[in-house]
Amino acid sequence: MIRVNDLKLPVEHEKEDIKKAAAKALRISEKRITDWSIYRMSVDSRKKPDIFFSYSVDLTVSGDEEKILLNIPSNKASLVSEYYYEMPENKRHSSFRPVVVGFGPSGMFSSLLLAKAGLRPIVLERGQDFDSRKKSVDNFWKNRVLNTESNIQFGEGGAGSFSDGKLNTGIKDARCRQVYLDLAEHGAPEEILVSAKPHIGTDKLGDVVKNIRKKVIELGGEVIFNAKLTDIIVANGFVQGVSYEKDGETFDLETDAVLLCIGHSARDTVEMLYKKGIKMIQKPFSVGARIEHPQELINKAQYGEAYKNPKLPTADYKMACHPPHGRGAYTFCMCPGGTVVCASSEEGGVVTNGMSEYLRDGENANAALLVGIEPENFPSEHVLSGMYLQREIEKKAFELGQKTYSAPAQLVGDFLRNTPSKRLGSVKPTIPTGVVMGDIRQVLPEKVTETMASAIVKMDGMLHGFALDDAVLTAPETRSSSPVRILRDEFFQTNVRGLFPCGEGAGYAGGIVSAGVDGMRAAEAVLRDEY
């Protein structure tokens, strides 16, 4: 099979034009192409007003493929093989079923792989099934009644279920393709297999994660909801089982393999692991706020005069800069046509996040504007100091939001002038629990807000209108990643054998795909049965 890269076509093109362009690039007749498919698609808007769709295409052709490629630059076309994930050999001899703690991305993909291998995993998820969880989230947003065990952070699908469902990742691991394939097989839009910026959308994610759960059960696995891990039973340095609470009762479950897929917000679980002597270290994390603009402004900035063309996707952005004092700032989890949401999981704390539906057709765009915090800037050397700093920021936000789970907010213009905001401008915040206008500097560390202010000005030079006076900053965003890393060795295990930490909560991933891949790698380690 031949892969042809960098085929640029104008916005107004038909599907057959892609095939013609591929044949031309290979200097062959279209008739020699026996089969073809799009491998990757993106939008190139760097040379406005000339905007192009860029394609990589896989072709099967008649004749000698190597001979066809003799005079074609290797960066333009090359021989490739169709991706195939080969299940590792199951060398596990134990009769115990492995236990997966958490059913977010790492938990879903680790349990799916274990189930495919015939190991009948038992999944403990502290939150509710997706449909019940959605009712709890809607009730929180409407009535401010927080379910601390089932919310945007906890429950079937993990934090990713209430997000844009972005599948972008910076990791280079062939397993990423299997994550995409599994998601598509279980109901995600087929376009995630070809888009350079794939996303599923909050409105479609629920069905996808439910279908994965059904598949795990169909293959012999078990998923127990409202089951909160309370203890790891250890003897002689080896896992012997787990304890969990469900409906007010405590249950023990015997096992010798526990996959910790706890997510970045299970602070009580991390404290339990710390007290058990599980080795972990401080890890850098980021804090900041959600910045919200009119989506039309972003479209104009990215596409110029073509911004109304219905063939172009809703525009997004991704930016990073290093203001003069050296601390870096970047945008994260940009949600085109989306909403800002209150994502609290602890009473008395406010956290923001962003989400978009599949069509991304909302009035506003939002993204996290984050600043990195290194361990040397944590309040103390205690391994959980970063986690406690997160909590302190969230509690300040709750106080400033009048203890109603409304979020502190400030107009960008006022923020840059260091003036508290008293009223909204032309941009209407989308957060369902509302905002309280004021000064977000009262919530976030000074070094963070100094960097944010410098970054907004710099980023306005990258994306015109980013420093819009009426754009809204809603604080705080504190849960972009885990502030601790649970140490694991080359066998994916902690200092307690049989305990496999993985995903975002363990400090080894940063998004749906990377967490899914890490879950697969942990499951593979269980199959290898090495100690």
Image (tube, rainbow, N blue to C red):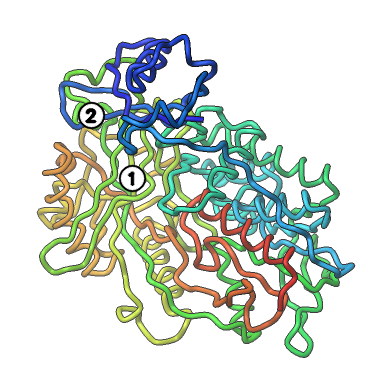
Which circle's residue, 2 or 1, is located before the other in the chain?
2
Q: Is residue 291 left or right of residue 205?
A: left
Q: Which mark is residue 45?
A: 2
Q: Residue at x 33, y 45 (%)?
A: 367
Instruction: Look at the picture and state if 437 lies above or below 454.
Output: above
Q: Is residue 229 left or right of residue 324?
A: right
What type is the residue that disc 2 sits on?
Ser
Give how far across and how far down residue 117 sits, in percent. 78, 53
Instruction: Look at the picture and state if 221 lies above or below 280.
Output: above
Q: Which mark is residue 305?
A: none
Q: Label 2 neighbourhood size at 10 Å, few (<14), some (14-19), many (20+)?
A: some
Q: Label 1 neighbourhood size at 10 Å, few (<14), some (14-19), many (20+)?
A: many
Give how far across and how far down residue 196 sits, in percent. 40, 35
Q: Residue at x 24, y 53 (%)?
A: 320
Q: Is residue 263 left or right of residue 419?
A: right
Give how far across and how far down residue 507 sits, in percent. 50, 67
Q: Is residue 219 left or right of residue 230?
A: right
Q: Residue at x 68, y 61 (%)?
A: 524
Local SS, label 2: strand
What quarter of the picture does the C terminus occupy? bottom right
Give how far across and how far down residue 203 sits, in percent. 55, 32
Observer-nearest of 247 and 294? 294
Residue linked to disc 1? 367
Q: Nearer the viewer, mark 2 or mark 1?
A: 2
Local SS, label 1: strand
Cα distance between the residues tagged 2 and 1: 20 Å
What type is the residue that disc 1 sits on?
Ala
